[in-house]
Amino acid sequence: LPTAVSSTGVTAQDLDNYAIQVRLEEINRKLRLNDYIPPERERSPSPPPTYDAHGRRSNTREVRYRKKLEDERVRLIERAMKSDATFRPPLEFQHMQRRNRIQDKVYIPVKEFPEINFFGLLVGPRGNSLKKMERESGAKISIRGKGSVKEGKGKPDQFADDADEDLHCLVMADSEDKVAACVDLINKVIETAASTPEGENDHKRNQLRELAALNGTLRDDENQVCQNCGNIGHRKYDCPEQRNYTANIVCRLCGNAGHMARDC
């Protein structure tokens, strides 16, 4: 039945909040009763059919109109959260947010550079490199496509649509800025690996150092004193200076190294 609302003492913001509540209840009822397909005269033309990896149509009329209502519900909830401090979103709102997050794909050039282990460079020891990029950007990274899962291991159902695609990083976040920042970090790793010899790749060296630290086999060469030249940062067998045969000789007169007593 139509409802009359008196505007006495009611602000425009209150009326907007009330309209949001009414529409949210209407959408929830339609979704609950599966009554989201409009009459035929109100329907838009059907788009060309699309299919998932299992050959099932993914844009049926039911799917399209249900998603349209779910998207509208998300927008209304976000409006209500901004305008009404007392509004409490439903528990499934976080799930809806994940489904509607902004995303982008970064394809990994494994065909152009088959000798480079891009997967290892992106993931890092125990996944730490990937986790670091996620912390810095605020986005979520999933590596999907061919080669993302070892042979013999089953792939989760949510990866089925990406199974036949080339290896790529799927980046997801709640804002375009976070997605763009994460994409930049991924591209930086890929571009550095493709343009820099492996022995000169600082990212690779840092990963090897981190792995050694995790395994308890790290040798702290950075704080080592060279027995040849006396400088810090390398060992004797890596010393760039000419071999100094008197470096370990200590003068018995002055106590300094590098010369004998007769030369003091």
Image (cartoon, rainbow, N blue to C red):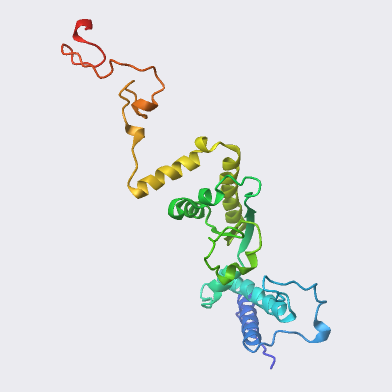
**Percent of width and height locating residue 39:** 79, 87
Q: Nearer the viewer, residue 73 or 49?
A: 49
Residue ranking furthest to the left:
253
Residue ranking furthest to the bottom:
1
**Percent of width and height locating residue 28:** 62, 84
**Percent of width and height locating residue 80:** 58, 73
**Percent of width and height locating residue 118:** 56, 49
Number of labelled discs?
A: 0
Q: Nearer the viewer, residue 255 or 88?
A: 255
Examine the rendering and report whether any part of residue 83 can be seen: no
Q: Can you say whether 264 is above or below 56 in the image?
A: above
Query: Who's the residue at 22% across and 10% down the image?
Result: 260
Query: Who's the residue at 66% across and 46% down the image?
Result: 112
Quadrant where the image shows the N terminus: bottom right
In-image side of 125 versus 179 (left or right): left
Quadrant where the image shows the C terminus: top left
Examine the rendering and report whether any part of residue 237 can be seen: yes
Query: Who's the residue at 61% across and 71% down the image?
Result: 79
Q: Nearer the viewer, residue 164 or 2?
A: 164
In-image side of 253 versus 105 (left or right): left
Q: Can you say whether 206 is above or below 40 in the image?
A: above
Q: Can you say whether 139 is above or below 73 in the image?
A: above
Query: Who's the residue at 62% across and 62% down the image?
Result: 102
